[in-house]
Amino acid sequence: MKVTELDLPGVLLIEPDVFKDYRGYYMESYSKRTLEKYGINDEFVQDNHLLSLKKGTIRGIHFQNAPYAQSKLLRCTKGKILDVVVDLRKDSLTYKKWISVELDAESKKQIYIPRGFGHACMSLVDDTEVQYKVDNLYYPEYDRAIAWNDPELNIEWGIKDVIVSEKDKNASLLKDSDVNL
């Protein structure tokens, strides 16, 4: 397994060992013991699975406020996504900075996103599936979203015609958010 820290402290790109032969392949998609070697000590308590039917579907920028903030371990299991992580920790040197990485089913790369970050993803092809683990259960009263097109963040999505939910269309700007991470 190869683990690389990205340009936001604590955000890791994980490239699992994939063993291929004439039958297909085998890989560990999750191993608590292996991830602990890289400082990931979260106890994941919920798995989520999403499907985006159309290219250009954006989900996010989502997070849960404290005390129910969530770390995520995420992978694209079908298709391809642009995964975006935004630092929402007001006391951080990288506050309001964002990174993006492409994840796809073929490479099997994963991203680890610690608590304190907002997360969004955009499907780059039709029929894209994403699966992710979280270390805190979902609490609707702590669920928050920042506008995917917040001008202060100026995220480069690379696609003009996007599909977003009503929740994401109505999400607040970061400057108006009650983020408490």
Image: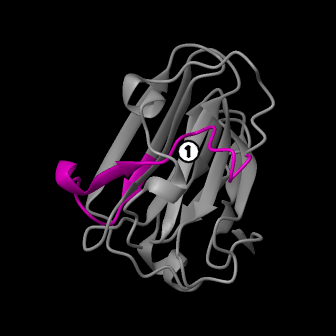
- Give above or below for 49 relative to 93: above
| Pick the front one: 41 or 163 | 163
Is 179 placed left or right of 140 in the picture? right
In magenta, the rendered stretch is 132-154
Q: Residue at x 74, y 47 (%)?
A: 154
Circle 1 residues within 10 Å: few <14, some 14–19, many ≥20: many
Magenta includes 149?
yes
Query: What amino acid type should be assigned to the residue bearing mark 1?
Result: Ala
| Pick the front one: 174 or 92 | 174
The answer to whether any part of residue 29 appears in the image is no
Is 181 placed left or right of 78 in the picture? left
Secondary structure under tag 1 reads strand
- Give above or below for 118 relative to 158: below
- List the residue tagged with mark 1: 120
Q: Residue at x 72, y 33 (%)?
A: 22
Return the x and y of residue 85 as percentages of the image width and height: 62, 56
| Pick the front one: 64 or 80 | 64
Is 87 placed left or right of 62 in the picture? right
Return the x and y of residue 32 as percentages of the image width and height: 42, 74
Return the x and y of residue 162 as percentages of the image width and height: 64, 20
- Give above or below for 20 relative to 96: above
Classified by dominant secondary structure, the portion drawn in magenta counts as loop
How many numbered marks, from 0 up? 1
Outermost residue on the front side: it is 176
The quarter holding residue 110 reads: bottom right
Colouring chosen for the image of the structure: one colour
Q: Quadrant of the N terminus?
A: bottom right
The quarter holding residue 24 reads: top right
The quarter holding residue 104 reads: top right
